[in-house]
């Protein structure tokens, strides 16, 4: 019966992890998947997470019952406060529908399915499309296509300047039909590491307000951009509190809590009235029930404990800034080896300017291929490197190879 099933290509990012694992070369380096590593190249269990999970395991009152369909209430309500701010009027006015999801991917999926069912494209005069940045996270296109919303690129990154194409981005915002949906990366853009400045976010928000666009925020790196959880929530909070732009937020705790495998995330849909909010939550619940019944408990309990215990919260803030700080150190080190020691041709200042887990090196696919095949340095073919894969022990080796492939 499956004779006509065509073989699908492997996932570009996870294939890199598998190839890296299979490689026996001693100096191999994995700069593919966006997962934090310590300076020994090892996965890092955050001290705050360690404490919370030990307390949970020791607590005999914790059982293994189902969570409710929308997830653990202490988790979803505190996760909403984390992104929107504890003083958020949208929260106090009962206008935020929060649902626990299978990490950020699940939040994107649930948001996409919800909009596909309930966003009134025809009535609003918008096409059944979502505008996504060019480039964007490799999974966005697949998620929206599967939900029946066509992904359409908007200009975002200018390869000539290795920076934001603000002109191209804002002119697409202006020329798109009114009430269109645009996906925005809340901070630490994946894959480019290029974020708008605050002033640019204000201008972007102004256009959203003028045009009635809907903002689909993907927030997978809160804390990773600046090391400060509140600072990284700036764009979302500006859109919600200052401009009342219709929006939803997909939130992941994979990166900032190092809970990759636990799949801890949330979808927050902001409505304009508590009545709408009630209806939205009820429909999200219906979709969730048919797809996963109810989300997994353990990771959400860990995050919820961290968010509600002042000591653990302090520790977590320190942990997040430890991760962001190490990444910033690696940016400085890589930049200084290339510019001062090797005098590699070209301008490498974008390594310092880009934000968060990734740097977009600006190399061509052939140069990336050489890094991979000859240098055993694993990166995606668009020249994105996960800065978290660099350590004080391998940064010289990586810089040497970048220098080699740039010189040709
Ligand atoms: C990445 O972009 O490397 C991560 O977000 C992992 C993933 O799911 O693709």
Image (spheres, rainbow, N blue to C red):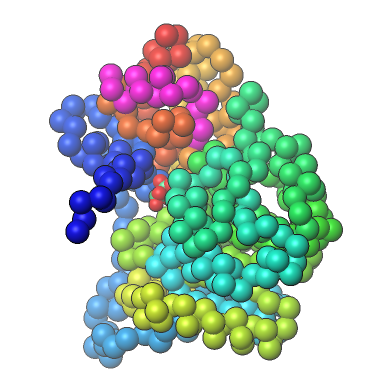
Q: Residue furthest bottom?
A: 61
In the picture, which quadrant includes the N terminus?
Answer: bottom left
The structure residue drawn at horizontal position 68% and vertical position 65%, both measured from the top left corner, is 121
Residue 124: percent from the left, percent from the top? 75, 66
* Residue 33 in view: yes
Q: Residue furthest left?
A: 24
The structure residue drawn at horizontal position 32% and vertical position 32%, both measured from the top left corner, is 378
Residue 369: percent from the left, percent from the top? 36, 23
Q: Is residue 309 left or right of residue 11?
A: right
Q: Is residue 312 left or right of residue 187?
A: left
* Residue 239 in view: no
In which quarter of the view is residue 168 placed? top right
Q: How many numbered marks appear?
A: 0
Above or below, 290 relative to 152 = below
Above or below, 281 relative to 197 = below
In the picture, which quadrant includes the C terminus?
Answer: top left
Report if residue 377 lies within the magenta region. no
Task: Say which of 103 and 288 sits in front.
Answer: 288
Above or below, 322 relative to 75 = above
The structure residue drawn at horizontal position 39% and vertical position 79%, both measured from the top left corner, is 290
Q: Residue furthest right?
A: 210
Residue 104: percent from the left, percent from the top? 46, 61
Residue 131: percent from the left, percent from the top? 63, 51
Task: Say which of 321 and 244 sits in front.
Answer: 244
The structure residue drawn at horizontal position 46% and vertical position 59%, both measured from the top left corner, is 146
Magenta residues span: 359-374
Q: Is residue 2 left or right of residue 172?
A: left
Above or below, 108 relative to 173 = below
């Amino acid at each position: 019966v499956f004779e006509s099933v065509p073989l699908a290509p492997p996932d570009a990012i996870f294939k890199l992890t598998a190839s890296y694992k299979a490689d026996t070369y001693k100096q191999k380096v994995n700069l593919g998947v966006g997962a934090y590593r310590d300076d020994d190249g090892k996965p890092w269990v955050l001290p705050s997470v360690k404490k919370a999970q030990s307390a949970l395991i020791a607590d005999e009152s914790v059982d293994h019952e189902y969570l409710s369909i929308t997830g653990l209430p202490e988790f979803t309500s505190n996760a909403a406060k984390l992104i929107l701010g504890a003083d958020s009027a949208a929260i106090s006015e009962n206008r935020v529908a929060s649902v626990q999801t299978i990490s950020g991917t699940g939040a994107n999926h649930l948001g996409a399915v919800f909009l596909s069912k309930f966003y009134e494209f025809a009535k609003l005069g918008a096409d059944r499309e979502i505008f996504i940045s060019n480039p964007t996270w490799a999974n966005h296109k697949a998620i929206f296509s599967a939900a029946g919303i066509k992904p359409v690129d908007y200009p975002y990154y200018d390869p000539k300047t290795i920076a934001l194409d603000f002109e191209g981005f804002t002119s697409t915002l202006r020329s798109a039909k009114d009430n269109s949906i645009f996906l925005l990366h809340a901070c630490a853009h994946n894959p480019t590491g290029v974020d708008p400045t605050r002033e640019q976010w204000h201008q972007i928000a102004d256009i959203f307000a003028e045009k009635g666009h809907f903002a689909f925020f993907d927030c997978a790196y809160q804390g990773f951009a600046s090391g400060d959880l509140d600072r990284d929530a700036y764009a979302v909070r500006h859109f919600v509190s200052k401009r009342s732009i219709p929006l939803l937020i997909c939130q992941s705790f994979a990166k900032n809590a190092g809970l990759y495998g636990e799949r801890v995330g949330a979808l927050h849909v902001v409505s304009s009235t508590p009545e709408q909010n009630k209806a939205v939550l009820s429909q999200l619940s219906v979709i969730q029930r048919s797809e996963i019944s109810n989300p997994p408990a353990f990771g959400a309990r860990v995050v919820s404990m961290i968010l509600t215990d002042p000591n653990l919260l302090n520790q977590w803030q320190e942990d997040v800034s430890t991760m962001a700080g190490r990444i910033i150190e690696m940016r400085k080190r890589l930049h200084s080896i290339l510019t001062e020691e090797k005098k590699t041709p070209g301008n490498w200042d974008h390594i310092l300017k880009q934000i968060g887990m990734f740097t977009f090196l600006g190399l061509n696919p052939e140069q990336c291929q050489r890094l991979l095949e000859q240098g055993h340095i694993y990166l995606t073919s668009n020249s994105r490197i996960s800065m978290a894969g660099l350590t004080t022990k391998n940064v010289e080796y990586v810089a040497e190879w970048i220098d080699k492939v740039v010189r040709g």
